Amino acid sequence: MVCVAAILSQATLFLALTILGLSSILVNTPETLMTLKIIGIIFLIYIGFKGLIDAGKYVRREFSFGSLFVKSFLIATINPKSLAGYLAAFTIIINPDVAIRTQMWVIVPTALTITCLNYTSFCALGAFLKDKAVTVTLNIRLRRVLSLFFILYGVALAFLTI
């Protein structure tokens, strides 16, 4: 749930930046947007390869709530899917003929509620599957498959973006 709080904080930050007009700036400066996309693509591919390398290693890491929050917040913030999603959604959803602050009274609570329900559901599913997928073999295979998906997602984004 600490990670969910971090993701909600990131979502709140992106919503606040949208209110301040950052999405308009990014949409109108394609070089900046492309740089952010490339950073996100490299990060996704890096996470995928790191996951493949570390798949067979079982290390139980201990995190403090603070470090877990910061790490989750940073990952959510540089996630290209999140950035692209907020940019796309808010450049499509926002009506330029209506004051942005007026529209945000509806958009912000709706977006945060959907985000909270989405990630809380993932946490509940993970907690449910935890005891069912504890076997080392399944865990290693699952980690490798998920790592490959990160790599494929990064490569797909690269071909679609660049």
Image (tube, rainbow, N blue to C red):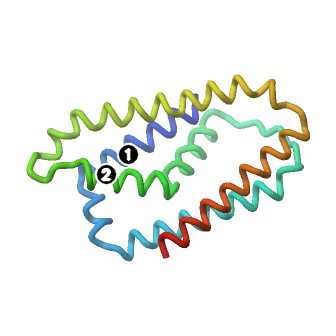
Amino acid bearing label 2? Leu
Would residue 117 be found to the left or right of residue 109 on screen? right
Q: Is residue 6 left or right of residue 108?
A: right
Of 59 and 23, the residue lying toward us: 23
Question: Compared to 65, does 47 lie above or below?
Answer: below
Q: Secondary structure at mark 1?
A: helix
Percent x, y of residue 87: 35, 56
Along the viewing direction, whichever of 10 and 110 lies nearer the viewer: 110
| The label number, if any, that marks residue 17 in the structure image | 2
The residue positioned 76% from the left and 36% from the top of the image is 62
Could you classify mark 1 by the number of other residues whose Cα lies within 10 Å: few (under 14), some (14-19), or many (20 or more)? few
Q: Label 2's element?
A: helix
How far from the left and from the top, in percent, is residue 88?
34, 55
Expressed as whole percent of the image width and height from the top left, the position of residue 28 reads 27, 70
Residue that appears at 41% across and 32% down: 114
Q: CA distance from mark 1 to mark 2?
A: 6 Å
Q: Are marks 1 and 2 in contact (CB under 8 Å)?
A: yes
Query: Residue 93 at what x, y percent from top left?
Result: 25, 48
